[in-house]
Image: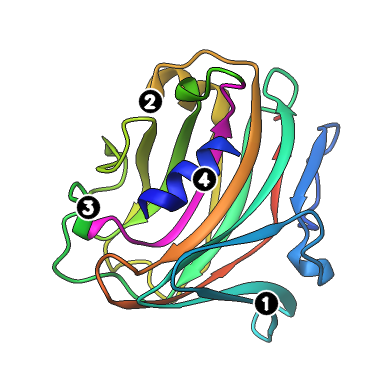
Amino acid sequence: MFKALLTLICMFAAPALAGATSIPIAQFTAGTLHGWEEKEFEGKTRYSLIRDDALGKTVLKAESHQGASGLFREIKIDLDKTPYLNWSWKTSSAFKGINENEKAGDDFVARIYVVVDGGYFFWKTIALNYVCSSSHNTGEKWDNPFTSNATMYAVDSGMKNLGKWQQYKRNVKEDLKNIVGKDTQYIDAIAIMTDTDNSGQSATTYFGDIFFTSE
């Protein structure tokens, strides 16, 4: 997972609110992965577009068995204009007996993260990870055990929401300032991942569309 974080650090069809600006990032419901690239790290997470009959929509399915690969998209977003990141996911399990503060427990059934590129000053590149945590409470933050350039933040945790679609909306500009301590106007990339390489466990998670909005 160390290689995954360093590589991604350095490198939808949801309706918009009335009068709001909306920027599509992932249009899974349209049956496309346009703009996304896959990067394999330790083993491979299988990503595929499938039909969710209960929703009546196409979603992204991520299946990971002791492996880790992620999807990422390089796209510059002006957080002064569209600061809100909107997404949804549904996961079927939580990991047992792991400590996410240690390298051996740095696995997540679901994560989406934003990257601020440091450019020539690559050591200044940072990533904020929104995760479904197996060992932290919702609202907790901590440094990634492999690199202090990546901050983890639990938007969900535990067992109570397993098997249920969860909707999220985060003000990324405020989160970068308040959680990471980075006051910035732009982010440069988005990544999603379901990874199980460090703990050696398995997970299946479904992702809905991803988009930024002005409100």
The residue under label 4 is which amino acid type?
Thr
Residue of label 1: 55
N-terminal-most mark, 1 or 4 = 4
Sequence-first tag of 2 and 4:
4
Kindly identify which residue carries mark 2.
179
Eye-nearest disc, 3 or 4: 4
Secondary structure, mark 1, is loop
Q: Nearer the viewer, mark 1 or mark 2?
A: 2
Q: Residues within 10 Å of mark 2 (few under 14, many from 20)?
A: some
**Of the pair 91 and 18, the residue shown nearer to us:** 91
- Which of the two labelled residues, at mark 1 and mark 3, occupies the earlier sequence position? 1
Q: Earlier along the polypeptide chain: callout 3 or callout 4?
A: 4
Q: Residue at x 80, y 44 (%)?
A: 16
- Per the model, the C-alpha gap separating discs 3 and 4 is 17 Å
Q: Residue at x 45, y 52 (%)?
A: 4
Where 35 falls versus 68 (above or below)?
above
Residue for point 72% across, 30% down: 77
Q: CA distance from mark 3 to mark 2?
A: 21 Å
Q: Which residue is mark 3?
A: 103
- Residue 113 magenta-drawn? yes
Instruction: Answer above or below: position of 72 versus 142.
Output: below
Residue on which disc 4 sits: 7
Q: State the residue in front, 155 or 120.
A: 120
Callout in the foreground (3, 2): 3
* Residues shaded magenta: 105-119
| Of the image marks 1 and 2, the number of the one nearer the N terminus | 1
Q: In front of the other: label 2 or label 4?
A: 4
- What is the x, y in percent for residue 71? 61, 58
Q: Is residue 50 left or right of residue 13?
A: left
Of marks 1 and 4, the one in the foreground = 4
Whether residue 151 is visible to the viewer of this picture, yes or no, is yes
Q: Amino acid at mark 3?
A: Lys
